[in-house]
Image: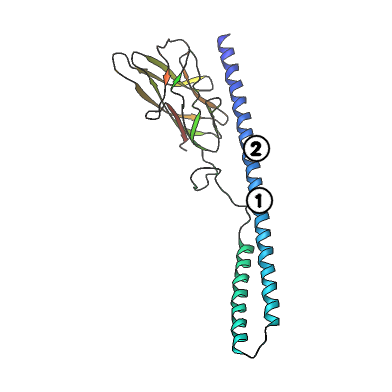
């Protein structure tokens, strides 16, 4: 019965992760649509202004009296202004539409990764109360290529079959220890023991696993469902409890 309940809980977390991913994608599409509409209105307004200036310059050119040196100078000036305006209009017409540009949502601009999957996240709060079979929520995202990691559930959902690398490290305070596991669906694929017994301050170990997973598999970090722990989970700006992963091939 415990195994059935555990499997049911994992499936629920998987569904919650998919719902959160869909909500994130929906928000991203709405924000890009708003930006595209804003840029389109600006380009139209700027183009209309340039066209108005061009017509005004053409009118001034026609009304300029030809014959005197002053008139000739004005005509040359108008011709230069007209050529400049035409170049600006040509640049606007050749500018790619904002709706067709591929831009990363936030952070550093980089090359597109159509089949990429990589994430890095850490715990932002100083102390987290934990218990047996506790799924750790690494709530602050550093990298999330493909948006396959869900900070609300602490789980990564594999976008496709392949070999992935996962690492995690957990900090505990002096006198404490934590048993943790890396789980794919309901299968434990990695385990780690972090101990600060007999030491001063905080300590951390790092676990790393290379594992083959299938599309839709859910990967997360939890405390041991049976073994006890002493103390809680800690994280600080100078030392982060973190969870990372990427598709190897």
Q: How many marks?
A: 2
Identify the residue shown where x is 51% and y is 28%: 139
Q: Quadrant of the N terminus?
A: top right
Label 2, residues with CA under 10 Å away: few <14, some 14-19, many ≥20? few
Question: Residue 224, position in %: x, y?
Answer: 45, 14
Identify the residue shown where x is 50% and y is 34%: 162
Question: Residue 197, position in %: x, y?
Answer: 31, 13
Label 2: which secondary element:
helix
User: Which dot, 2 or 1, sits closer to the camera?
Assistant: 1
- Residue placed most toward the observer, 217 or 227: 227
Asked which colour scheme the image uses, the reply is rainbow
Of the residues under marks 2 and 1, which one precedes in the sequence?
2
Residue 136, above or below 117: above
Identify the residue shown where x is 59% and y is 52%: 101
Q: Are marks 2 and 1 in contact (CB under 8 Å)?
A: no
Classify residue 244 by image quadrant. top left
Q: Which residue is mark 1?
A: 38
- The mark found on residue 26 in the picture is 2
Residue 173, above or below 237: above
Label 1: which secondary element:
helix
Label 1, residues with CA under 10 Å away: few <14, some 14-19, many ≥20? few
- Residue placed most toward the observer, 70 or 3: 70
Estimate the spatial distance between the alpha carbons at disc 2 and disc 1, rounded to whole Å. 19 Å
Left or right, 84 with reference to 189: right
């Amino acid at each position: 019965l415990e195994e059935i309940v555990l499997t049911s809980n994992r499936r629920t977390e998987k569904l919650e992760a998919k719902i959160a991913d869909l909500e994130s994608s929906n928000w991203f599409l709405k924000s890009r649509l708003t930006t595209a509409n804003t840029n389109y209105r600006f380009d139209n307004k700027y183009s209309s202004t340039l066209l108005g200036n061009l017509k005004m310059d053409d009118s001034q050119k026609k009304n300029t009296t030809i014959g005197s040196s002053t008139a000739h100078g004005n005509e040359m000036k108008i011709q230069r202004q007209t050529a400049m305006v035409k170049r600006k209009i040509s640049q606007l017409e050749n500018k790619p539409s904002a709706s067709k540009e591929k831009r990363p949502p936030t952070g550093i601009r980089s090359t597109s990764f159509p089949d990429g999957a990589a994430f890095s996240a850490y715990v932002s709060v100083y102390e987290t109360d934990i218990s047996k079979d506790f799924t750790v929520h690494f709530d602050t995202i550093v990298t999330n290529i493909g948006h396959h990691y869900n900070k609300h559930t602490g789980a990564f959902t594999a976008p496709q079959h392949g070999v992935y690398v996962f690492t995690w490290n957990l900090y505990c305070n002096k006198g404490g220890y934590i048993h943790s596991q890396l789980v794919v669906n309901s299968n434990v694929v990695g385990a780690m023991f972090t101990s600060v017994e007999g030491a001063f301050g905080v300590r951390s170990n790092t676990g790393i696993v290379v594992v083959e997973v299938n599309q839709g598999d859910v990967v997360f970090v939890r405390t041991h469902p049976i073994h006890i722990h002493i103390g809680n989970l800690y994280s600080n700006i100078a030392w982060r409890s973190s969870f990372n992963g990427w598709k190897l091939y």
